[in-house]
Image (cartoon, grey):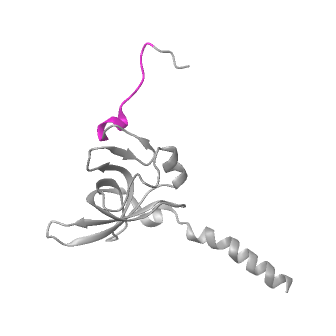
Amino acid sequence: MPHFLLAVILFLLAVPALAHHSFPAEFDKSRHGELKGRIVGVWYKNPHARYRMEVTTDDGTVEEWDIQTTSVTSLRRAGWDPDTLTPGETVRVRGDLGHGDSRKLFMRGMEKADGSEYLPFGPVGSWSERNRVNASADIEYG
């Protein structure tokens, strides 16, 4: 009986580890994409926040895409909360595409219909501002 109990405990401890995956297993960092569509589902929980997006193609076909981003902890540090992106909103997202023909994208940035822009790793004023240098030649930084 003690061996059986130990086996059950070890199995239960291993299940969360199996649920997590590596980035390269799902996404191709060399393939970038940009999508515009309507959010239809939100899963704001660890290990990664996920969004379901409906995208209408040029021929009128509606596709469902799985949009994944970083952990809820990182999103909160970047100023996000569960209501930053809600079902019904139309947004533009960009990021790394999934392998093959999978309809997946790992979000690197998002723009709402009102023009406000968000990065999962911190707020940004516009797409072009994320690489702006905020340093002065008159200040000694150390």
Answer left or right for 38 relative to 77.
left
**Would you identify the image quadrant in which residue 117 lies?**
top left
Residue drawn at x 74%, y 80% is 8
Residue at the limit of the structure toward the right, as seen here: 2
Answer left or right for 130 relative to 49.
left
Answer left or right for 12 relative to 122.
right
Residue range (magenta): 127-138
Quarter holding the C terminus is: top right
* Residue 55, position as x, y percentages in the image: 25, 65
- Against 82, residue 116 (above or below) is above
Indicate whether residue 133 is drawn in magenta.
Answer: yes
The one nearer the camera, 18 or 89, is 89
* Residue 102, position as x, y percentages in the image: 34, 70
Residue drawn at x 43%, y 12% is 138
The one nearer the camera, 39 or 97, is 39
Residue drawn at x 30%, y 50% is 112
- Against 54, residue 123 (above or below) is above
Quarter holding the N terminus is: bottom right
